[in-house]
Amino acid sequence: MIRILLISMIFIQQFALNGQIKADYSNDEHWLILPKDNQNILTPYITDSSLISYADVFYIYPTVFTDKKNKNWNVSIDDEEQCKKALRVTRLQSSAWAESGRMFAPYYTQAHIRSYTELENGGRSALLSAYDDVKEAFIYYLEHHNNGRPIIIAGHSQGSTHGMLLLKDLFDGTKLQEQLVCAYLPGIGLHENEFKSIPFLTNEIQTGGFVSWNTFKRRYKTKKFKNWYEGTATINPVTWDQQKYADRKLHQGFLFWDDKMYAQSFHTHLENGAVWISLPKVPFRSMAWTLEDYHIGDINLFWKDIQINAKNRVRAYQQKEIAKSQKP
């Protein structure tokens, strides 16, 4: 009888009330990427490994739970379809930081995309439930893997929402803030004073703060722009400052869906919380003409720019640490 009871308790711990597996980050299967996996999905994107042994990247993937017919608020980390989607987008996005440090990316019980538009009807709880997993994964990473190494937080969309909450809960005004190289949080609206002591970074080699942007077709503003993005903290992810305009010649590279890099692809223009871009010079560019909100491409449009910038910030952080250690 006792044995049956114990088995039942273990079963309950493994499954949430709605049948979802409870994340256990001591189990490698509950991580989408761990450093040893760099030899698999990220290896094709790594040509310079000089910084990987110095820093860490904690990446949080964006919303892939979008099925309108699915009425659940969260998706289980063992959902095969969602795992495939998460892996696909993670390969294309997280690879921008693959040369900046060891990569850690957890699976999490992601909130459905409707959570953002139905916050009071269950969406807020769904997002917080998803964040609980991300926070648990990050704490496990800190306790078992970090060993005091510099940290980049990288996310997109829902991943940026959870990254923002991590900064507020664990970094802002704490000792851990000293390890923050940069938090890259595109795809959500953040304000320059979003945090108590974590600054919005406005040049290409600043460290210890965050950057954010939201990408749109030139001169286009969505209906939700005023409530979500207008007046928010926005960096130009080509120049990494608040320069209003950057010519396409400065654009380092768009990682397109064909896995090819397209440099000097578009102009960028900052406009009150938005990054407007001209029509990208890529194959099938006429299809892009029908798009007005480039949210889905916030990272890949600037993939090479991010790769170069992240490495520059890690090097700047490294130089500051060397200078501190040499002080008498």
Image (cartoon, grey):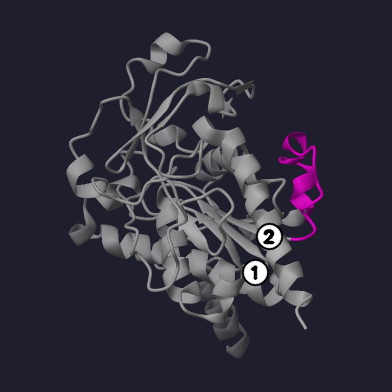
Q: Which residues are magenta?
A: 36-54
| Image disc number at residue 141 | 1
Decide whether residue 64 is among the magenta residues.
no
- Badge 2 crowding class, 10 Å Cα cut-off, few under 14, some 14 to 19, many 20 or more, is many
Q: Is residue 103 visible?
A: no
Q: Position of residue 104 (x, y in %)?
A: 65, 57
Q: Position of residue 314 (x, y in %)?
A: 67, 56
Do the residues under discs 2 and 1 have CB atoms within 8 angstroms? yes
Q: Looking at the image, which residue is at 35% across and 60% down?
A: 127
Decide whether residue 51 is among the magenta residues.
yes
Magenta span main SS: loop
Q: Looking at the image, which residue is at 33% across and 64% down?
A: 193
Q: Which residue was labeled with disc 2?
A: 56
Counting residues from the start of the chain, the first of labels 2 and 1 encountered is 2
In the displayed structure image, the side of residue 222 where residue 187 appears, left or right: right
Q: Residue lying furthest front in this view?
A: 328
For the residue pair 83 and 202, the one nearer the viewer reads as 202
**Element carrying mark 2:** strand
